[in-house]
Amino acid sequence: MIIKIHRSVLLSIVAALLVACGDSPAPDSATSSPAQYDLVLQGGTLYSGADEPPFIGDIAINGDRIAAVGNLGEYQATQAIDVTGLAVMPGFIDIHSHALSDQPDQGIFGWPDAENLIRQGVTTVIEGNDGSSPVPLEPSFEAIAALPPAINFGSFIGHGSIRALVVGEDDRPPTEEELELMREQVALGMEQGAFGLSSGLIYAPGRFADTDEVVELARVAGQYNGMYISHMREEGLALLDSVAETILIGEEAGLPTQLTHHKVVGAPMWGASADSLRLVDEAIERGVDVSIDQYPYTASSTNLMILFPGWALDGGREALLARMADPSQRQRLRNDIIYNIEVDRGGDDPANVVLAGCPHDESLNGMNLSQVLLQQGQEVSKANAAELLMDLVAAGNCSAVFHAMVEEDVHNIMRHPRTMIASDGGVEGPSSRAVHPRNYGTFARLIGHYARDLEVIPVHTAIHKVTQMPAQRLNMTDRGILEPGAVADIAVLDIARVRELTTFADPHQYSEGATHVLVAGELVLNDGAMTGARPGRIVRSSDYRFAAQ
C-alpha cells in the first residue's frame, strides 16, 4: 500500500528530526539540551511558498537562515514572537521592478527603506526590465550595496540599453562588429550577476531590433543559465504576433522565455487573453519553457511616447522634435497618435490617459487629457488630444496611466499556472506625482482582493505566485520557500486585514495587513512599525562570475 504524505506534514517531520538529531547522533534524552535559536516565530499558519494549503507550525532562525520549520518542541531563543492566527510565508519576490530612478531623490536611492514594498511583504526586487538597465551593472550594484537598502536588489541586463550604447537611437540593424560588441555587453552583464536578458521591443531603440538580433543576444544569456524576459512589441492589435515572437526567441535561443506584464490593451482586443494563453500552452506542449508575469490592474503606466509610432522615434529626441516642427510630418504623426488613442492605450477616449508625472509642469499631474484640453479652452477631441500629446512630449515628456484593459483578461491571465505576479512599479514615497497604484498595492491587491475576496485563485496559490515561483524562475534555490537552510526573508501577514489603500486619485498610501517582515533574518517591520533596519543585499544569478575575474 502506498501512503501519501502532504508536503507540509513531511516538512514538519523533517524539521523535527533536524532539531532532534542535528548533524550527529541524538544524545541521551536525560542529558539533551534544548535547541538554541536567535529568533522563533511561534504558532503561525505557515504558507511554505509551494502551491499547497498552509499548516500550523513554528519557524526558527539563526543568523540570516531558517534553522527549522515545524513543531519545534522545547527550545531556547534570544527572541520569540507569537504569530498565532497570522500567516507566515516567504518574503515576496517582485520579478518585474523599476526600483531605480534617474532622479537621485526617487527610487531606491530616495527611499532606501522601501516602505511601500515592505508593508506589502516584498523583500526582493528585480530591476532591469523592459530592456532598460544600467550598463554595466556593477557600479549600480556597488552603489546600492553601500546604502544599504531594506530590501534585496537584483537585475536583468537590458537589450535596449545595450543597443543605445552600441548602435544609438537609429532605426537600423547593427553591423556585425556592433552585434559582437552587444554580445560582449550581454556576457559582461551576466558575469556581473544578471538573471537574464530583458527587452522592451515596444520602446525605442529596442523596437528597431529584428527578431534575429534578439535571438543572438538571448543565446548569450542562455549560455550563463539566464532567462529572456520581454515587454513585447505589441499588447494591442498585434498582441498574438508579439506573443509568438517572444516564444520563438526563447525557442530559437534555447533558454527560458517570459511574457512580462502580460496584458490585453485596447477595446478591439478585449478577451484575446484566451488566444494568447493558448499560444503559451501550445509552446509548452512542444517543450518550450514559457512563463508569464502580470500586475493585477486594468490600467498600465509608462511615458506618453508609447502612443507615438516607431517611425517618428528614429534618431532619438532631436529627430522627433524636428519631425514635429515639419507641418507634413506633424500631420502624419497626429494621425498615427489618433489611431493609437482609438485602438490601443488611449482606450478610445482621451480621458483614459491620465498624466502621472510631468516634470516641466507638476500642476498637470493627475489630470487626464480631456481635463487638460478643457483647462486650455479647447474642444475635447482625439485630434486635439494628439496635438496636446506632441506638445507635452516637446516640453519634456510625462509619465501617464492608461485605462485600456478589462477584468476578464486580468482574471484569465492570473489563473494560468505559469503566471506569477509582479508590480512593474518601484520604490516610491510621498510626492506630487500621480503614480500608478501598483507601486503601493500590487501584492496586497493580489492577496486581499483577488484571492481572499473574489477567489479568482486560492490564497496559497497567490502566495506561490510571488514566492517560490519567481524564485525558481530565477534559479534562486535558497529563497521563496520556508525550509531549513533558506535565507530568512519572511513576511507575516494578517490575511483578514490585508488590503490596498492606494487609489488612482490618491496613490501614496501604504497597504495594510503586514505585521512583521524579516530580511536576512532581521526585522525590518516589527508589529506593524518600520524598525529602520536596512539589511538588504545584492542578489546575483547562480552563474555569477565577476568575483573570479
Image (cartoon, rainbow, N blue to C red):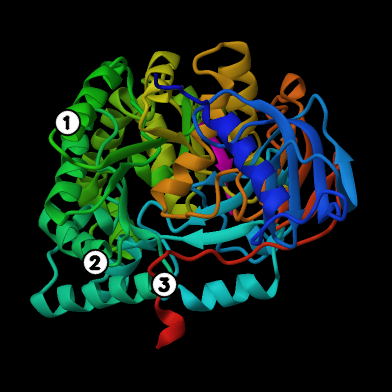
- Region in magenta: 354-361
Secondary structure of the residue carrying numbered label 2 = helix
Is residue 425 located in the magenta-colored stretch of the structure?
A: no
Q: CA distance from mark 3 to mark 2?
A: 12 Å
Residue 188 visible in the current orientation? yes
Q: CA distance from mark 1 to mark 3?
A: 31 Å
Residue at x 33%, y 26% (from the top left corner): 264
Mark 3 — residue? 544
Q: Which mark is residue 452?
A: none
Residue at x 44%, y 58% (from the top left corner): 128
Viewer-nearest residue: 132 or 155: 155
Q: Amino acid at mark 2?
A: Gln
Of the image marks 3 and 2, the number of the one nearer the N terminus: 2
Secondary structure of the residue carrying numbered label 1 = helix
Q: CA distance from mark 1 to mark 2?
A: 24 Å
Location of the C terminus (image quadrant): bottom left
